[in-house]
Amino acid sequence: MSIQDKQILVIGGGIAGCSTALELAGQGAKVDLVEKEDFMGGHAARLACKAIDACLKCNSCLAEPRLLQVLSEPAITLHRRATMSALARVNGGFEAVLHQRPAYVDPGCCNGCGLCLQVCPALEEGAIKGPALAAELPRLAIDPAACLYFKDGQSTMCRDVCPEEAIDFSRKPQEVRLQAEAVVLATGFAPYDPAPVQRLGYGRFADVVTALELEAMLREQGRLLRPSDDREAHKVAFIQCVGSRETAGNNYCSRVCCGYALRLGRMLAVRLGTQVSVFYMDLQSFGHAVDDFLAAAESELRLIRSMPYDVYRGKESQVLVDYQAQAGKAPVSEAFDLVALSVGLAPNPDNPGLCNLAGLDSGHHGFLASGDNAGVFLAGTAARPMDVAETLAHSGRAAQEVINYLEGA
């Protein structure tokens, strides 16, 4: 049986969901692509290019073309701000119920003038945000969790200043019902939250950030600035395995952290002249030409096989890192302009609910695992930690599994 005009539901609008949807649409299927945020792309849309004199194979450049294709593919229907609240078997297929939050900024009216950004009193808290891709509509979106209007019912400065009358706080959520003959869960991962690891200073010192936040900073600004004072950071430390390979966090290796930290560090050292130190237990690197890559990293970066045990505020607004430079020697304290925590990939917190809805199992570490519910498939980091290239390959395999399933129906 051909999949021509078959209806397929893909949950998750990150790189895995977008890639799977494109593969299926290319084979003639009709795809409903569901994303819980206002904008598509997930974490991959905010990754920075790490190329120096040559490509470092970080694969972040693979994400944007696929996301742009999704936005223009007529066989893919996007459902933003939506989460699946029910999934049931109906006539051999599925019926899904979506809960869809309203778009308080009308994408058909907003012209991106930015006047609302100028008057928003909660802008730094994320009340109004924009997409990672300039081509995406809507151009702006309001987050009700941060917007003051949803706390006091009176803060309407953004609405009042908008010349296009694009902002409407009275819009209500909707329930959407969709029919599908197969379902793909591409709901991704959650970056490990390092705040509970208080000794590393995240959430207490502005100049301690996650490596993913550093990537977003480089993508948006093209420079490495300290969040505390907007001065350029000339000396940076990466701390590896934050939330991975430890009993207090996740006791598995997230596989991607060493690779992305070393690529980021090399890019900062070569392109910006930054002094980069990397604190690690051991270095795990997967992919192409590993030995050459590690040799280059050793020549350009300061690699320190020691895990810091304390990070705190020093004089002149620097961040002090305490570590043991040599076994049996006294600890040392070293000052840095910025500290980046290489956080691991944790399971999506929505996974237990998705398992209940879709009849799946939860894997040993909390990622999704295939269950007995025929017609439900997994794509990307919903299943396990992967880098961008692995995610694309896994998504392609998921699409082929859907095709095989429908052709055998």
Image (cartoon, rainbow, N blue to C red):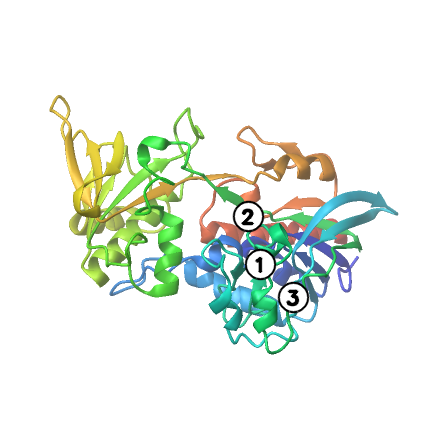
Give the labeled residue for mark 2: 380
Expressed as whole percent of the image width and height from the top left, the position of residue 375 reads: 74, 45
Q: Quadrant of the rendered structure where residue 89 is?
A: top right
Q: Are marks 1 and 3 in contact (CB under 8 Å)?
A: no
Residue located 22% across and 47% down the image: 317
Q: Which kind of residue does numbered mark 2 sit on?
A: Gly
Packing grade of label 2 (10 A; few <14, some 14-19, many >=20) is many
| Distance from Cα at disc 1 to Cα at disc 3 | 11 Å
Sequence-earlier tag: 1 or 2: 1
Residue located 30% across and 52% down the image: 228
Expressed as whole percent of the image width and height from the top left, the position of residue 323 reads: 20, 31
Q: Is residue 267 left or right of residue 176?
A: left
Residue located 55% across and 52% down the image: 146
- SS at circle 1: helix
The numbered disc on residue 26 is: 3
On screen, residue 291 above or below 119:
above
Q: Are marks 1 and 2 in contact (CB under 8 Å)?
A: yes
Sequence-earlier tag: 3 or 2: 3
Q: Is residue 258 left or right of residue 361?
A: left
On screen, residue 57 above or below 85:
below
- SS at circle 2: helix
Task: Kindly tell me whether residue 216 is visible in this rendering.
Answer: yes
Give the labeled residue for mark 1: 19
